[in-house]
Structures are given as structure tokens and as C-alpha cells.
Image (cartoon, rainbow, N blue to C red):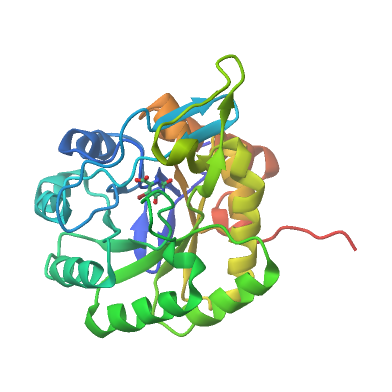
């Protein structure tokens, strides 16, 4: 199997494998980020950061069952300066370090992005346009005019590798409209998808919601969302200019799930719910499952099948 490679690159950033963590689970503290450094995750991606440290929503705020997860964490994070100042201590892992940014306003985002631009040890920025869990705040990704305004302002000050994390879209007109906007800017990557916002999971025995914030409403991840994630990866790969890499996220718990995302056009994939469930070993396991599947199909590199999903004529 040694001749099978799952290496990839995101707009020139080399990754030893196509698998790394999604922003969210187990990437908030220095201990989490060191664990990712030591693991088979191909990159280290931080929890979405705000200007100041933020405690997030009241618990219980995360729940999982065999089909996936629901969360309403509400952006608990240490504040961007923490993730900024940690960068030098993560260099020893010799893998890219991405900082996720999700300020509470455009001004906050611009302030954070400006500061991160000064830090050469931060490889890239993932600007989160899709947090579904801040009470009273809509998801930016569903407000197309606002996305345009944000990107217009961000690219006046940004010189770093920068991509955006999008919410899932469900109607073709929304894919076309969003892709038209994204194609106007020097984005390096687009991550599809964040959790499906404002779902509701119920415990029948107690006849109750399972998380406390927003009366039980939260972002859905895991198996529940894989078909939606695949459709978003596929459609954005079709519509975005080739300079923009597509990162798949949603429902990846096996090598076969990763293969499906890549077949739809993903250049790399992120693991969220399954990382939370299984811990740090998930990266090595999924990587070896993916390599085994590629071997059985006679593929030696991701490029031999990336985006090559067949249609029924
Ligand atoms: O912290 C959260 O509640 C959260 C965020 Br920022 C996000 O982007 N997606 C999600 O499911 N939860």
C-alpha cells in the first residue's frame, strides 16, 4: 500500500494527507491543538475565534446519537490572540496551522484578519460565514448582499491564504448566486458545509429536547448531513473557478465517506462529529481505510478520481 498517496494541496499549501479536523470539536485549547499536531490530522485548524474570549451558550449544548450530532455551542473560544500567539509553538509539528475566524461583526472580523495577516506562522485563515448558534444573529452565508460586503472589505486588507466556511444550500439558484459572488474574489478555498442549522433532536423517553440553548434548536452534523454535504461540494466544484479549492465537510466517518467527497470534487476533507466521537485516532483509521479502498480500485493518487463522479445517461 506504500505506493498509494493521499497527499493533496489547497491553493499551494501542501498537505501530507487530505484529512484534517473540522473547526469546532476538540480544537479550542492548546492541549487540543497539540493533540492534533501529534495526530495523523494533516493540518491543525482552530476553533472559530472572536475578538475576546467567549464562554458560549449554557450546557447541555452538545448531543450525539448513532446518526450524528446536534450542537449549540455558541462560539466558546479563547479569543483570537490566543490562537495567534500559539502559532509559533505549533511549528514543530511541520503541518499547516489554520485559524478559524468568526467575529460577532464585520468590524471584529476585519480587526482579527488584519492582526493574523501580521503572523507568518499562521498558514491560512478560514473565515466562518455560517455559525448557526448565536441567539439573535442570522447566518451570514444566507444573506448574499452581506457576504459580498464582507468579502469586499476583507480583501481590501487581506494578503494571506484565506477561505470561507459556508452553510449548506438547498436550492440551485442559491448555489448559482453564491458561486457568482465567490468567483469575484481571490479566495483560496471554500469549505462545504457547516452543520445544518436549526435542527431539532428529541428524546422520546423523556419527551424532551436534548440541548438547552434556543429551546433545543441546533446545528446538525454526522450521517444526517452527508447527502447535503456531497451536493454542496459537487455543485460548488462545478461552479467555482479552478483557483478556489473545495474542502468537503459533513458526514465523514469512514474512508468510503472521504472517497465520496473527493469523487464529488473535494481537494481535502474535514472530520467533525466523528472526531468528537472517536477522538484523535479517527484520522489514521480513516486515512488507512481510504488508502485501502483506493488500492482495491487501482488508484494511486487522489487526482485519478477527484471530481470524476459518473452520471446516468
Ligand atoms: O460554536 C458553535 O456553536 C458552532 C459554530 Br461557531 C459553527 O460554525 N458551527 C456549529 O455547528 N457550531
Numbered circles on residues, count: 0
Residue 73 quadrant: top left
List the single residue furthest toward the right: 313
Picture layout, residue 26 above or below residue 167: above
Q: Identify the residue at horizontal 51%, vertical 66% (top origin).
A: 142
11 left or right of 218 in image: left
Residue 276 quadrant: top left
Q: Identify the residue at horizontal 29%, vertical 52% (top origin).
A: 48
Query: In the picture, which quadrant includes the C terminus?
Result: bottom right
**Residue 59 visible, this orientation:** yes
> In the image, residue 19 lies at what x, y percent?
44, 45
Choose between 124 and 250: the one closer to the eye.
250
Q: Identify the residue at horizontal 30%, vertical 70% (top origin).
A: 161
260 left or right of 147 in image: right
Picture layout, residue 3 above or below residue 150: above
> In the image, residue 176 lies at what x, y percent?
63, 76
Q: Identify the residue at horizontal 43%, vertical 58% (top origin).
A: 130
Choose between 256 and 183: the one closer to the eye.
183
**Residue 250 visible, this orientation:** no
157 left or right of 228 in image: left
> In the image, residue 98 lies at what x, y percent?
28, 56
> In the image, residue 87 lies at what x, y percent?
14, 52
Amino acid at each position: 500500500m506504500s505506493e498509494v498517496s493521499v497527499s493533496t494541496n489547497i491553493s499551494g499549501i501542501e498537505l501530507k494527507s487530505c484529512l484534517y479536523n473540522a473547526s469546532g470539536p476538540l480544537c479550542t485549547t492548546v492541549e487540543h491543538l497539540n493533540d492534533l499536531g501529534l495526530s495523523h490530522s494533516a493540518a491543525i485548524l482552530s476553533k472559530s475565534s472572536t475578538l475576546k474570549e467567549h464562554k458560549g451558550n449554557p450546557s447541555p449544548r452538545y448531543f450525539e446519537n448513532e446518526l450524528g450530532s446536534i450542537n449549540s455551542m455558541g462560539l466558546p473560544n479563547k479569543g483570537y490572540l490566543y490562537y495567534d500567539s500559539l502559532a509559533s509553538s505549533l511549528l514543530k509539528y511541520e503541518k499547516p496551522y489554520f485559524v478559524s475566524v468568526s467575529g460577532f461583526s464585520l468590524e471584529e472580523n476585519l480587526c482579527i484578519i488584519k492582526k493574523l495577516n501580521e503572523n507568518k506562522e499562521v498558514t491560512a485563515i478560514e473565515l466562518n460565514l455560517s455559525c448557526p448558534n448565536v441567539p439573535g444573529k442570522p447566518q451570514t452565508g444566507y444573506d448574499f448582499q452581506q457576504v459580498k460586503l464582507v468579502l469586499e472589505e476583507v480583501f481590501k486588507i487581506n494578503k494571506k491564504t484565506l477561505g470561507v466556511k459556508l452553510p449548506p444550500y438547498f436550492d440551485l439558484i442559491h448555489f448559482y448566486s453564491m458561486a457568482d459572488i465567490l468567483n469575484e474574489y481571490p479566495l483560496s478555498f471554500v469549505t462545504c458545509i457547516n452543520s445544518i442549522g436549526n435542527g431539532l433532536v428529541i428524546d422520546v423517553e423523556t419527551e424532551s429536547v436534548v440541548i438547552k440553548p434556543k429551546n433545543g434548536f441546533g446545528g446538525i452534523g454526522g450521517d444526517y448531513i452527508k447527502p447535503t454535504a456531497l451536493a454542496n461540494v459537487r455543485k460548488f466544484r462545478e461552479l467555482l473557478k479552478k483557483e478556489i479549492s473545495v474542502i468537503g465537510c459533513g458526514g465523514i466517518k469512514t474512508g468510503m465517506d472521504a472517497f465520496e467527497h473527493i469523487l464529488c470534487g473535494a481537494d481535502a476533507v474535514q472530520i467533525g462529529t466523528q472526531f468528537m466521537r472517536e477522538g484523535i485516532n479517527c484520522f489514521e483509521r480513516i486515512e488507512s481505510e481510504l488508502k485501502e479502498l483506493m488500492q482495491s480500485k487501482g488508484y494511486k493518487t487522489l487526482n485519478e478520481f477527484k471530481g470524476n463522479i459518473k452520471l446516468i445517461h
